[in-house]
Amino acid sequence: MKKFYIHTLGCKVNEYESDGIALSLENQGWLKGDKRQKADVFIINTCAVTSKASMQSRQAIRKIIRENPDAKVIVTGCHAQTDPEQIKKIDKINQKDQIVCHKDKIQIANHIASICENKSPLTFKKPDHSLENIFHGFDSAVTGEMTRAYLKIQDGCNAFCTYCIVPHARGSSVSMPEKQVLKHLRQLNDAGFKEVIITGIHTGMYGLDLREKSSLLDLLEKINDEKPIYRVRLSSIEPGEINNGIINLARQENILCDHFHIPLQSGDDDILKKMKRPYDAALFEKVIHQIHKKIPTAGIGVDTLIGFPSETDEQFENTYQLIKKLPISYLHVFPFSARKGTPAFHFDNKVDPKVIKSRCARMRELGKIKQKAFISAQLNKRQEGLVQHKPDSKTGVLKATTSNYLTVFLNKKYNLGGKIINLIPEQFDSDMNITGRIVE
Ligand code: SF4
């Protein structure tokens, strides 16, 4: 049996797409190998979100070619899309059928089958920026190996924030038709999944491109009415795209998890303008209070981008103080790094990397304080948890993920993987590991 291996860099959308490619190959009789084994075909799904990610993508390609000189190598993903010429400079990546752009990803399995059977490979267009405005999705639901499945309902972005390469890599926003979303959710339910993470590049733009105009709220309401799966979670949503309708769907009787992951990036209005983010700190504050007021138990995660060009101490302080006063449950802190191909790459007054480092450290400390406060407020409250298939690798103890995104280590060792249980979080340690017990 022919074997393949996929090396994935970057975000959850890339992981989802790699899982989809793997499933298509397995359906055609291929065996999925792991890193250490030899394979006949290697696929590298690259990332371009930072210059470092692009460099790591090229390193991964070189390493695989060096270690597997006789294998076939296919390169896809954002770096392949934005900079195919760089990739072609790599020794042995000179054939045009080795670089596959985003919209052709779903055909990679057929492409590989053709190459390996010495038929002529599928003809792909040269990766360029003229991405067609059509959603290219897998025919069937992508199951992957995780307890919680992902479903990409949207791709691309029209926002062009000044630091972000993604719209250049993935084109304008396109959405999976509603019927297909529901079909995939039902398939995932039939495959035994209890939770699906609804993902995309700019999920809040869902539906705006469809012939029958729709929106993320319309879609979530439909899912809530039809209940094709036990629960769904939004992977992330922009502050200006959260509304009362979406928040209401995250209330306990409904299907949406009470967990919102919201990119703030900066709490300073001038920096937000320079980033071309379409909201101000006041709107962000209002949204967080709106969520917390309606759902006090909701998990609210926030992304921050620290050290954007010209960010002064005072402007950083604005971000810090905004986060400090809001009921946020965890923080993701990213240091700014100039990405070639974006406007911010050329912005003056770059912040000293040492200053960025110390601001990030301060923000991460604040993140810990926020997380501790959130966890403390959730102790001794009964919640539903989805038990992960794989017990903790160190202790062998089961873990469950709650609707508001706590991971709770449980007191039972027998197999409950994939099941929804009731639990009570009881205590947590200095590393924020929460332990709890299963209850009836
Ligand atoms: S909203 Fe901004 S940060 Fe997010 S993908 Fe679009 S351009 Fe990038």
Image (cartoon, rainbow, N blue to C red):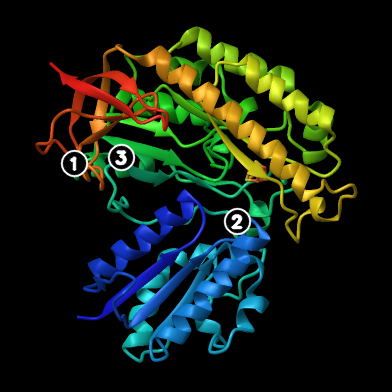
Query: In percent of the image, x 52 and y 35: which residue is there?
Result: 236
Residue type, mark 1 in image: Gly
Q: Residue furthest front?
A: 430
Distance from Cα at disc 1 to Cα at disc 2: 31 Å
Residue tagged 1: 192
Q: Secondary structure at mark 3?
A: helix
Given this view, does label 1 or label 3 mark the residue nearer the observer? Answer: 1
Q: Which mark is residue 206?
A: none
Visible residue check, residue 31:
yes
Residue tagged 2: 170
Give the mark, 1 or 3, whose residue is nearer the N terminus: 3
- Give the x, y percent position of residue 124: 52, 76
Residue tagged 3: 185
Image: 315 above or below 296: below
Residue type, mark 3 in image: Leu
Q: Quadrant of ligand 1?
A: top right
